Amino acid sequence: MKEKEYELLYNGMTKAENHINNSRTLLYTVTATMLAFIFTQGVINPYFYLAPFIIIIPMYHVTIRYAKGLFRIAAYIIVFYESDNEIKWQTRLHKFRLAVKDTFKRRYFNSDSLPYLIISAICLTLYFYSVIVIQGVYIFLAEIVIGILILMIIIVITLQQEPLLKMKKRYIDEWKKIKEMELKSKLHNMV
């Protein structure tokens, strides 16, 4: 029974990783298509460069949701399977990631957001270039404010996400509490 649950959990992790990869592929494809369409137009409207945010923001949330699920399952495996077992892949992987030299990035930055940040930066750079350089004299304050607001939204969305290693540690601690409660409950029922 325990092996079947482990297999299901591992399959869940694999599906989450696939969803994350598929989301990124969709992000790249749709954004590249949108930008290619914009570049082929004779007259460039700067607002077109903001159109990819229709896909960037939702896909970012989908990716983070699946990453959280992935780390929740990994934390569960660490607590409920690897504490009593010789196989400790998830435990060792977690310790390895904590020990990696690039600790700032791993501990304080959610690396799953990097593709979304890069694409956002490209779109905002093209938007500001279009507004400032191409339109030149005809810059409206509203266009600058819109670009800055979108930039601030992206920064806030990114900063509100808990770094994945901190999240995983929190999930491990939560699963340990649940395991302790279950053990206490079993002991209490035995008495």
Image (tube, helix red, strand yellow):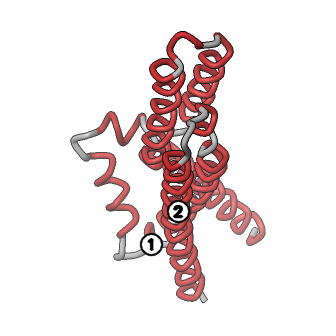
Mark 2 or mark 1, whichever is nearer to me = 2
Per the model, the C-alpha gap separating discs 2 and 1 is 30 Å
| Relative vertical location of residue 126 with respect to residue 13 in this rendering, above or below | above
- Give the number of callouts: 2
Which residue is rendered at x = 56% and y = 36% of the image?
A: 44
Q: Which mark is residue 20?
A: 2
- The picture places residue 172, in percent across and down from the top left corner, at 53, 53
- The quadrant of the picture occupied by the C terminus is bottom right
Mark 2 nearby-residue class (10 Å; few <14, some 14–19, many ≥20): many
Mark 1 nearby-residue class (10 Å; few <14, some 14–19, many ≥20): few
Q: Residue furthest left?
A: 101
In terms of depth relative to the viewer, which is nearer, 72 or 80? Answer: 72
- The quadrant of the picture occupied by the N terminus is bottom right
**Residue placed under numbered mark 1 in the picture:** 84
- Name the secondary structure under disc 2: helix
| Relative vertical location of residue 153 with respect to residue 79 in this rendering, above or below | above
For the question of whether residue 75 can be seen, the reply is: no
- The picture places residue 144, in percent across and down from the top left corner, at 59, 16
In terms of depth relative to the viewer, which is nearer, 189 or 55? Answer: 55
Which residue is rendered at x = 51% and y = 50% of the image?
A: 40
Q: Amino acid at mark 1?
A: Asp
